[in-house]
Image: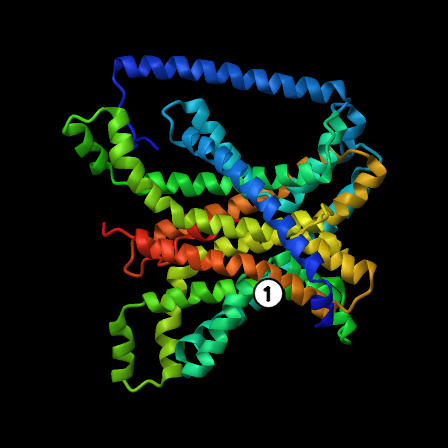
Amino acid sequence: MSRSVLYDAPGPRGRRRIAVASVVAGVVLVGLAVLAVRRLAANGQFDGSRWSPLFNPGDEDFADLWRLLGGGLVHTLTAAALAMSLSLLLGVLIATTRISAARWYRWAVVGMVELLRGVPVVIAIFFAAQVLPVHGLKLPPLWYIVIGLTAYNSVVISEIVRAGILAVPKGQRDAAAALGLTRGQTLRIVLLPQAFRSMLPALISQLVVILKDTSLGAFISYEELLRRALIAIQTLHNPIQTYLVIGGIFILINYLVTRLATYLEARLSGRRARPSVPAEDLATG
Amino acid sequence: MDVITDNLGLYADGLLGTLTICGLVAVAALLLGVVLAGFRVSPVPPLRAVGTAYVTLVRNCPLTIVLFAFAFGLPEVGINGSYFAFGVTGLTVYTAAFVCEAVRSGIGAVETGQAEAARSIGLTFGQSLRLVILPQAIRAVIPPLGNVGIAMVKNSAIVGAFGVGGELYSVASTLNGARGEPALPVYAGVVIGYLVIVIPAGLLVLAAEKRLRVAR
């Protein structure tokens, strides 16, 4: 942030103060880093045996470990892709129902949306994993994750879609009506394509949320990345190093996805259909 | 539904436990988040870099991994604690990144002209901050902060799934897992417990949003 509301562009004295503060902050940060490294070293965290299975291709465990983790990553991405597609499908369905349904029926939809939005995702996943099998629906763990994630994210996405549809200028709807398009046609041909463009950044941000939440699969023994990492740690005894690596994988993927969302937002905001739902605002954790 | 009415005390304890975790995390994450936001808007480059790095790393990492790393990573370097302490710390570290972003965007929402006007009528830095910028920034910050808070309440369930005990999620594992009560009503009760917190909080945020909206 080169220009801030909080202060003027610094003058010579201000610049000197900033320089001094930078040096002090730098020294403090380096000091903290040294303390952390010494603590890690004192507890043997830099021993080669803890790192080489992860980073040294010559290590006897390297190939097995990465086959394990790679498979986990594939499972993570599978769950995320399925949950995202289903959530998008259901989200569009819920949003269009909410916009076009009869009044009494709309209340039912609104109620369901508000209810599901308030349920923690982890509870939704446990709910699926514990309740469905009792009532005769026995599925592989992947589907409990997908059902739990979809239950929550489809209503979140329906809100994004609704905001997107409502943000399309009213003239578009009027024009479609004047052309004699039915309500369904208006929605499908005129409103949704335009809305979709404006909500793309927000949808991509939601993808980050879904991807992060797939790691909850570790609790119901779905063998995604985190679960596989836990398995690996049991034999290799290097929790810090393994968490660093899998955390890094998640951070890298999500960072790239977020950058994509920001890029699209910047590109699309130049056009008439402005993103009605900013990408950043929706991700609250 | 007898399970819920028979175990109302257990559910109430769980609700209280969840509220305790959330209260602790809310205070700590607010403090840490505001400090981080201060870092991110400060004129000192190293502090800005720290703030940006923190937010980028923490926001993109699943809370589950943060919690596992705290509970099983820290003991490796001789830092021991209870699951409760690790859970609360992990959720705080995670939530602070979102608090930071909410606060930062609030400060960013105040137009530069406001500060310029304040300075041009001769207000000092302290006066312009206190009388002009902060009142507007706080207005812009409260609704998003409320949403972060709601997300935090829901995330506390992950801390619960981690085995902290004594909060809403653990009620389900006690009743369903240990005592073999039927899953559906047990989970319905837990969901109601969360909704009791989240829905009023959501309405509060909505009301605050309406009240604090300023024509800009």
Given residues B190 and B44, the one toward you in this image is: B190
Where is B70 relative to A90, above or below?
A: above
In this view, which residue lies farthest toward the left? B121
Quadrant, the N terminus of chain B: bottom right
Given residues A131 and B5, the one toward you in this image is: B5
Task: Name the side, left or right, on which A13 lies relative to B204.
Answer: left
**How many residues crowd mark 1 within 10 Å: few (<14), some (14–19), many (20+)?**
many
Where is A175 relative to A216, above or below?
A: below
- Residue A94 percent location from the top left of the image: 49, 73
Where, by quadrant of the figure, is residue A116 drawn? bottom right
Where, by quadrant of the figure, is residue B114 drawn? top left
Q: How many marks?
A: 1
Circle 1 chain: A
Q: Is residue B184 visible?
A: yes
Where, by quadrant of the figure, is residue A64 drawn? top right
Residue at horizontal 76 percent and vertical 22 percent from the top: A43
Q: Secondary structure at mark 1?
A: helix
Where is B179 relative to B124, above or below?
A: below
Residue at horizontal 70 percent and vertical 51 percent from the top: B161
- Residue B21 percent location from the top left of the image: 61, 44
Task: Name the side, left or right, on which A276 lies relative to B165.
Answer: left
- Residue B149 percent location from the top left of the image: 50, 48
Residue linked to disc 1: A150
Residue at horizontal 26 percent and vertical 78 percent from the top: A174
Residue at horizontal 25 percent and vertical 78 percent from the top: A175
Given residues A68 and A32, the one toward you in this image is: A32
Which colour assignment does the render follow?
Answer: rainbow
Q: Is residue A146 visible?
A: no
- Residue A53 percent location from the top left of the image: 78, 34
